[in-house]
Amino acid sequence: MPRPSSHAIQAHKPKNPKRDPVAAGERDASVNRSASHNYILNDRMEAGVVLRGTEVKSVRKGQANLKDAYALVKDNELWLLNAHIGAYEHGSYANHEPLRTRKLLASRTEINKLAARLRTKGLTLIPTRMYFKNGKVKIEIAMAKGKQEWDKRETERRRTDEREARDAIRARKARE
């Protein structure tokens, strides 16, 4: 005969409303806004990041910067270079280096596909955003091709035209 348990089973607790939105996964920890300006972004994929404890705490505080970061495949492993994660203010002598090279976690088949695509001239891997998913830090990387100066002007012109058209439609609807 099973013994009755002395503690009551509690229903699933609702999430703490005061919890940080970055840590809860509701908002990105870092976004590389210059990536879409400087590159044509094609295929995107999600990868995990191998981080130390102080790095995770710094990412939660929003001290991550992906502006000059890039990823590469070396020895059949995926690496993230130049991603700046600021030093944790309450860290001790064991604090991390802000610009250290970090390993990215992806399946072997994904890494092999990326390595094959990267052999094409002019393609690179650019991290576009860093976020939390189920308590783990994830990074979205995109296959990118660099834009020429005229490409950047063309993109800016297209955005301006779309914005003006949207504003005109909104103004027309406001008058009616």
Image (cartoon, rainbow, N blue to C red):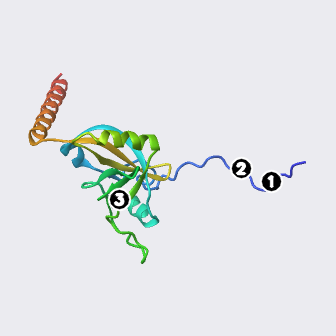
Residue 58 is situated, as x and y percent measured from the top left of the image, at 39, 63
Residue 131, label in figure = none
Circle 1 packing at 10 Å, graded few (<14), some (14-19), many (20+), is few
Residue 60 is situated, as x and y percent measured from the top left of the image, at 41, 59
Position above or below: 79 against 120: below
Residue 62, label in figure = 3
Circle 2 packing at 10 Å, graded few (<14), some (14-19), many (20+), is few
Compare marks 3 and 1 and give the one earlier in the sequence. 1
Q: Secondary structure at mark 1?
A: loop
Q: Residue at x 19, y 28 (%)?
A: 170
Residue 5 is situated, as x and y percent measured from the top left of the image, at 80, 53
Residue underneath mark 1: 5
Q: Is residue 172 toward the left or the right of residue 116 in the image? A: left
Query: Which quadrant is the C terminus positioned in?
Result: top left
Residue 119 is situated, as x and y percent measured from the top left of the image, at 28, 42
Q: Label 1 sits on what residue type?
A: Ser
